[in-house]
Amino acid sequence: PSTTLFRSVDAEDMWGDIDTTKVDLGALAPRILRAQKRIPVHDAKPVHRMNKCHTCYVRVIVWDPFRDLLISGGGDGWIRLWSTEDYRREDEINARHSVRSLLVLTKALASGHHNGQVQLWDLEAPGRPRLQVLKAHREAVYALA
């Protein structure tokens, strides 16, 4: 029997429950509607290659819909914020610990690290200061939801 290695990415599975008629999404509504459409994996094509983003591996990359940024986290301990228009670096945060996971909140960013810490960062304030450090795990924090 043949094994399917890839399946169509179905954004509707993840984002299909956002009813854009009941929630004011402002300028994000058209992007969310586009994100809800199926994307066949075999038809996907890269739109841009970003080189030398981190001095170590990139463990995680997320989209920040509130500020329209891509945010990457690396093994080098840096969190980098990238423009979705021209893919240039907008800002960076020195988390000082290998970044394993990221979660975008409305005004903040949560980052999970190799040492079990979760750090919260203020994405609205100049310099994007750290708001809090939570130490609740003995192992790396690989996911935040």
Image (tube, rainbow, N blue to C red):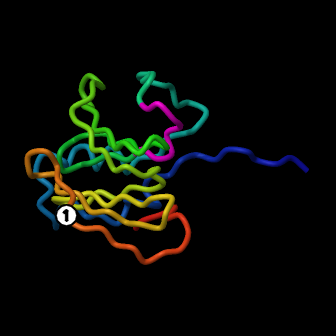
Q: Total marks drawn?
A: 1
As displayed, is residue 47 above or below residue 104?
Answer: above
Based on the picture, tell me whether residue 59 belongs to the magenta stretch: yes
Q: Residue at x 58, y 46 (%)?
A: 8
Q: Position of residue 82 (x, y in %)?
A: 28, 33
Q: Is residue 143 left or right of residue 1?
A: left
Q: Which residues are magenta?
A: 54-61
Q: Is residue 114 left or right of residue 135?
A: right
Q: Is residue 35 left or right of residue 2?
A: left
Q: Position of residue 44 (x, y in %)?
A: 52, 31
Q: Residue at x 28, y 49 (%)?
A: 32
As displayed, is residue 136 above or below residue 85?
Answer: below
Q: Residue furthest bottom?
A: 136
Q: Position of residue 95 (x, y in %)?
A: 34, 50
> Which of 16/121 is in front?
121
Based on the picture, tell me whether residue 119 belongs to the magenta stretch: no
- Label 1: state its secondary structure: strand
Residue to which mark 1 is pinned: 131
Q: Residue furthest front?
A: 96
Q: Residue furthest right?
A: 1
Residue 104 sits in quarter: bottom left
Q: Residue at x 13, y 45 (%)?
A: 127
> Which of 48/11 is in front?
48
Which image quadrant: the C terminus? Answer: bottom left
Q: Of the residues shown, which amino acid type is indicated by label 1?
A: Leu
> Which of 130/7 is in front?
130
Q: Is residue 20 left or right of residue 3?
A: left
Q: Residue at x 35, y 66 (%)?
A: 17
As displayed, is residue 106 above or below residue 62?
Answer: below
As displayed, is residue 100 above or below residue 134?
Answer: above
Label 1 CA crowd tier, 10 Å (few <14, some 14–19, many 20+): few
Q: Position of residue 43 (x, y in %)?
A: 56, 30
